[in-house]
Image: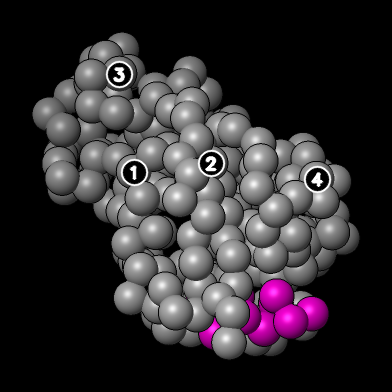
Amino acid sequence: MTPVTVALSNDYDVVVHGLEAMLAPFSDRVRVVELNVDTETISHVDVTLYDTFSRMQDGGEAIDELVSNPRNGRVVIYSWNVQKELVEQALSRGCSGYLDKSMSAEDIVSAIERIAAGETVVPPPGAEQGTDEPRGAWPGQEHGLSAREAEIMALITQGWTNEDIAERVYLSINTVKSYIRTAYRKIGVTRRSQAVRWGMQNGMLPDHERELR
């Protein structure tokens, strides 16, 4: 059977490479064609997997752009926020699936195959918010940051306020502040200006490149 062709989309190089590494053992079923870091797909693929790290959780305008590009095939959101309203918003924008980051690599591959075949795949009814430790990779991981802490540090580095971050990552403002405190302790800073400087020096700004396979 011909493998499903896939493009991976996110603003961070380490994130798409982490996804590629997860899918690599299943190359006979899913073939990664492009790693798009803040770039448009130029190959025709069956499925585009959109990782929400540091992005709007329902995709926003970025999803509108992906869905409107026929080269992207069927667009799927990959997120640890699996609340019903987010899933419904994504589907209303034209997405063909919504996958939880706590899924095993094999389950992700099976879901991608089903979506490529025409199914719409979403978390089961009653699913709770996904784990804080999804599989894959993220910037700051080598410094002990959790995926959530890294995402919030990335947004701080980009200049977002706490209120903006809470809206973007779909968390309460108090939860965001809690993640900020634990992240600051881990990287040894106490002020936002120090955190921004640390982030700029440690890969917390978006990348801009494309890799073709």
Q: Secondary structure at mark 4?
A: loop
Closest to the camera, between mark 4 and mark 1, is: 4
Indicate whether 96 appears above or below 72: below
Q: Residue at x 34, y 29 (%)?
A: 204
Q: Which residues are magenta?
A: 109-118
Closest to the camera, between mark 3 and mark 4, is: 4
- Given the image, on which type of amino acid does mark 1 rest? Val
Q: Earlier in the sequence, mark 3 or mark 4?
A: 4
Q: CA distance from mark 1 to mark 2?
A: 11 Å
Magenta span: chief secondary structure: helix
Residue pointed to by mark 1 = 14
Residue pointed to by mark 3 = 200
Q: CA distance from mark 2 to mark 3?
A: 21 Å
Q: CA distance from mark 2 to mark 4?
A: 14 Å
- Given the image, on which type of amino acid does mark 4 rest? Asn
Q: Residue at x 84, y 59 (%)?
A: 94
Q: CA distance from mark 3 to mark 4?
A: 32 Å
How packed is label 4: few (under 14 Cα within 10 Å), some, or many (20 or more)? some
Q: Is residue 133 left or right of residue 103?
A: left
Q: Earlier in the sequence, mark 2 or mark 3?
A: 2
Q: Earlier in the sequence, mark 4 or mark 1?
A: 1
Q: Which of the two residues, 192 or 4, is positioned nearer the viewer here?
A: 4
How packed is label 3: few (under 14 Cα within 10 Å), some, or many (20 or more)? some
Q: Residue at x 40, y 59 (%)?
A: 19
Q: Is residue 129 magenta?
A: no
Q: CA distance from mark 1 to mark 3?
A: 15 Å
Q: Secondary structure at mark 3?
A: helix
Residue pointed to by mark 2 = 36
